[in-house]
Amino acid sequence: MKAVVHKDKKGFAGLTQIQDMPQTEPKKGEVRIRLKTAGLNHRDLFVLDRHDPEDPPFVIGSDGAGIVDTTGDNVSAVSQGDEVMVNPGLYWEKNSDAPPSGFEVLGFPNNGTFAEYVTVPASAVVKKPDYLSWEEAGVFSLAALTAYRALFTRGNLKAGMNVFIPGIGSGVATFLLLFAQAAGAKVYVSSRSEEKRQTALELGAEKALDSSEDWKKGLGGCEMDLVIECVGAATFNKSLDTLRKGGTIVTFGSSTGDKVEMDLRKFFYGQYNLLGSTMGSHEEYIQMLDFIQTHQIRPVMDRVYDLDDYEEAFKRLEEAKQLGKIAFKIS
């Protein structure tokens, strides 16, 4: 089968497309999916530097949607011909405080979705909501699940809350905006890009601040109940300054650096809450699907590429030019 793989070299130098990647036959409890579309995530950039050149080639990609091609033994929830989406969070069934031992994310070290076929546990497959196009379904899972857990499970979002999302533009950030607004929250965002700020306002944000401005001043005295932080060192302390006393920061990303210096005395006097989050359980994935269908939420789509144009798609994501989700059309 045709697939985008990583092999032999670290980083982008190891990206290549091959025509003869072997298909995997589904074992007991597994299904093989003929993929229609797949979604590009920042994780797909990060794993290029985590995969050692001496390790076997692997197929990149966590998100995907397609048609069940064949099933292994003991599979009853889906059948050949069903239109499905893949939950890339594997072996985390029930909601819990943290992922269990054995939790994996599809697409490293296991083979992922930037290919004509993918084989996954049947427990990670759900039927595609009818209202979503193939391109929308193919980009939904990883970013939407991450946003759902960060907002609702960890952030305990309620209607009427003020929510701040630094760095609007990524797939997760746009889902955060759509989900929080659908739940009745007032959403505030920031971005370096005027185009992204304007789009956020069109999507329903109350205010869209320039990343370089004074956020407290820009918010006009409005304090946040909840901040969802995925930028990291560059924005963490500015995000903290927007919080009301007793407010909460949920963090799940650190694209601008892992190390943060903070005023600990200010933090404990403010009675702030700092929570980590990552991905989510399959139980939360089902809750998220119910939520999006209730509110008829669609992902913000940036561009759709043919799989042959993977280099251009990766470059667009690396340079943070995207607004919303990037999809690959496979078949």
Image (tube, grey):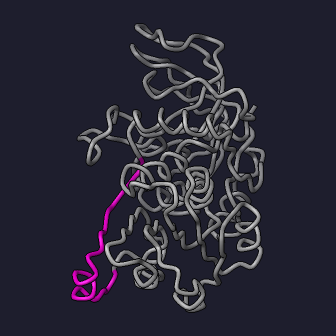
Q: Is residue 236 above or below residue 281?
A: below
Q: Is residue 258 magenta?
A: no
Which segment is the magenta one?
260-279
Residue 323 seen from this side: yes
- Give the total number of marks visible in the rendering: 0
* Front residue (pair 106, 251): 251
Tell whether position 266 is magenta: yes
Q: Tell me if residue 125 comes above or below residue 291 in the rendering.
A: above
Q: Quadrant of the N terminus?
A: top right
Taking 118 as reference, is 148 above or below it?
below
The spot of residue 127 in percent (x, y) is 59, 23
Looking at the image, which is closer to me, 142 or 153? 153
Vertical relation: 291 (above or below) 126: below
In-front residue for pair 153/77 = 153
Instruction: Determine the image quadrant of residue 168.
Output: bottom right
Residue 14 seen in this snapshot: no
- Identify the residue at horizontal 65%, vertical 84% (top origin): 210
Q: Residue at x 62, y 41 (%)?
A: 114
Left or right position of 305 against 325: right
Q: Position of residue 247 (x, y in %)?
A: 36, 71
Where residue 291 appears, as percent x and y from the top left, is 55, 38
Which residue is rendered at x = 27% and y = 48% of the image?
98
Task: Give the position of the C terminus as an image quadrant.
Answer: top right
- Along the horizontal axis of the image, is 324 left or right of 52? right
Say which residue appears at 29% left-offset and 69% top-offset: 273
x and y, in percent, of residue 145 in the image: 49, 45
